[in-house]
Image: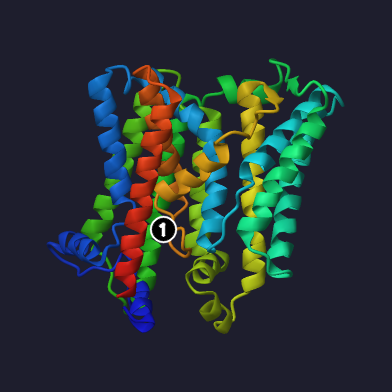
């Protein structure tokens, strides 16, 4: 497809449809033919994974296990959200795990050994993330160094700094009574508040769809029918209220998971409704075209790296709270690979310009579901690595096929 054709299709947007009966079906068929299925494949894959594990172990879809699953998703999911942003601008950050580990070490050492307030240590840890992102942005925009190289170097540098901050003991335990540990391990939204937040999300989504529809009508662009809009809002309300009601039959929605989902919603709003978000997608799609269009390319790259590293630091803070400790293994191992895999499995393109903030949520749900299901089946880590790798390969394969189809 030519660049002009692609621009025309982008102008029409995913919501474009012919009003009237059958509009939703024709829209779906059009998306299938064009290879633009959005997050439908990953949602179907997640449903299949849940169904298979439920058949193999009836405990898998119990409310207790799903609550645990959501708590396990929060910290790594925040890292994956940052990775989504750098992938959208066509770059990569291999150091998110090390940055999160250093942030966790700063929180633990600051709170326990230096006796700083937890809030102050959290701000210091976030400052580490901002500094790392600014450094990456300068290296990329001023020195033109490949992001793969300097973030790989950053992985080693920040891992070394983490060991230095932790000191000779290599591990610092946070007081169990500190608010960070209490919120991370035992903090759950009251049932009434969780329903109120869901209602707020549904109303905001409906308002966003109606405002977008009105703008497209004023621009004389094709719009989705009100029936399609109502169906989307109704489906979202049904899914969210059903999920929250089921989780509330157990401990409920954890504060950390609610924070993660809230961050995803905010980033999604920024990507879709702000000039910065449009610049991120444009730069990732074609840097030269974005530069000729007058977009702030350099600032967009820097902001993506800063956002990614800051979210990595936040993930480290949440991890320290959940584990009530920071040690040499925090942020290490395969956590950065898991975060990158979650972003890609969720539908974010490795080639830039295509993806969604919700990719982080869906991707980490898939990976943690596989991990939880295999743990219940008493299978070891090697099987989890193999299955997660196969799912990642399929996600990349689909991404490549869709990208090739869009270039025809």
Q: Position of residue 154 (x, y in %)?
A: 70, 49
Q: Position of residue 149 (x, y in %)?
A: 65, 57
- Residue 315 visible in rendering: yes
Name the side, left or right, on which 78 lies relative to 310: left
Secondary structure of the residue carrying tag 1 is helix
Name the side, left or right, on which 38 lies relative to 298: left
Q: Position of residue 202 (x, y in %)?
A: 38, 46
**Which residue is denoted by mark 1 in the rendering?**
208
Towards the viewer: 43 or 144: 144
Name the side, left or right, on which 14 lies relative to 328: left
The residue at the point 41 percent across, 58 percent down is 208
Label 1: few (<14), some (14–19) or many (≥20) C-alpha neighbours in 10 Å: some
Name the side, left or right, on which 241 lies relative to 277: left
Q: Which corner quadrant holds the C terminus?
A: bottom left
Q: Quadrant of residue 68?
A: top left
| 141 versus 111 height, above or below | below
Towards the viewer: 116 or 266: 116
| 141 versus 366 height, above or below | below
The residue at the point 50 percent across, 28 percent down is 72
The residue at the point 45 percent across, 39 percent down is 364
The residue at the point 38 percent across, 78 percent down is 7
| 78 versus 248 height, above or below | below
């Amino acid at each position: 497809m030519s660049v002009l054709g692609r621009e025309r299709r982008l102008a029409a947007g995913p919501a474009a449809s012919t009003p009237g009966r059958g509009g939703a079906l024709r829209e779906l068929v059009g998306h299938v033919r064009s290879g633009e299925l959005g997050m439908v494949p990953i949602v179907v894959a997640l449903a299949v994974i849940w169904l298979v594990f439920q058949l193999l172990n009836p405990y898998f879809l119990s409310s207790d296990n799903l609550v645990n699953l959501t708590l396990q998703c929060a910290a790594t999911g925040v890292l994956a959200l940052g990775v989504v942003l750098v992938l959208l601008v066509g770059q990569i950050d291999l150091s998110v795990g090390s940055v999160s580990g250093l942030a966790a070490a700063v929180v633990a050492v600051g709170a326990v050994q230096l006796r700083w307030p937890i809030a102050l240590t959290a701000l210091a840890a976030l400052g580490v993330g901002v500094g790392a992102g600014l450094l990456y942005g300068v290296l990329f925009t001023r020195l033109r160094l490949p992001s793969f190289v300097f973030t790989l170097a950053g992985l080693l540098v920040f891992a070394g700094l983490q060991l230095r901050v932790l000191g000779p003991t290599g591990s610092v335990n946070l007081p169990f009574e500190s608010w960070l540990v209490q919120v991370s391990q035992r903090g759950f939204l009251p049932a009434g508040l969780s329903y109120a937040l869901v209602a707020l999300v549904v109303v905001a989504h409906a308002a966003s769809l109606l405002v977008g529809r009105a703008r497209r009508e004023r621009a004389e662009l094709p719009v989705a029918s009100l029936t399609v809009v109502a169906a989307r809002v109704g489906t979202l309300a049904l899914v969210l209220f059903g999920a929250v009601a089921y989780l509330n039959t157990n401990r409920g929605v954890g504060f950390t998971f609610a924070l993660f989902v809230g961050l995803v919603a905010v980033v999604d709003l920024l990507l879709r409704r702000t000039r910065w978000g449009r610049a991120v997608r444009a730069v990732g799609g074609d840097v030269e075209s974005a530069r000729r269009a007058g977009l702030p390319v350099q600032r967009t790259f820097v902001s993506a790296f800063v956002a990614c590293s800051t979210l990595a630091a936040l993930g480290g803070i949440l991890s320290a709270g959940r584990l009530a400790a920071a040690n040499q293994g925090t942020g290490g191992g395969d956590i950065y690979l898991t975060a990158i895999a979650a972003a890609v499995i969720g539908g974010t393109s490795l080639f830039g310009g295509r993806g969604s903030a919700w990719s982080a949520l869906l991707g980490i749900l898939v990976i943690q579901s596989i991990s939880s299901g295999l743990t219940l089946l008493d299978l070891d880590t090697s099987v989890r690595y193999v299955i997660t790798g196969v799912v990642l390969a399929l996600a990349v394969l689909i991404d490549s096929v869709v990208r090739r189809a869009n270039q025809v």
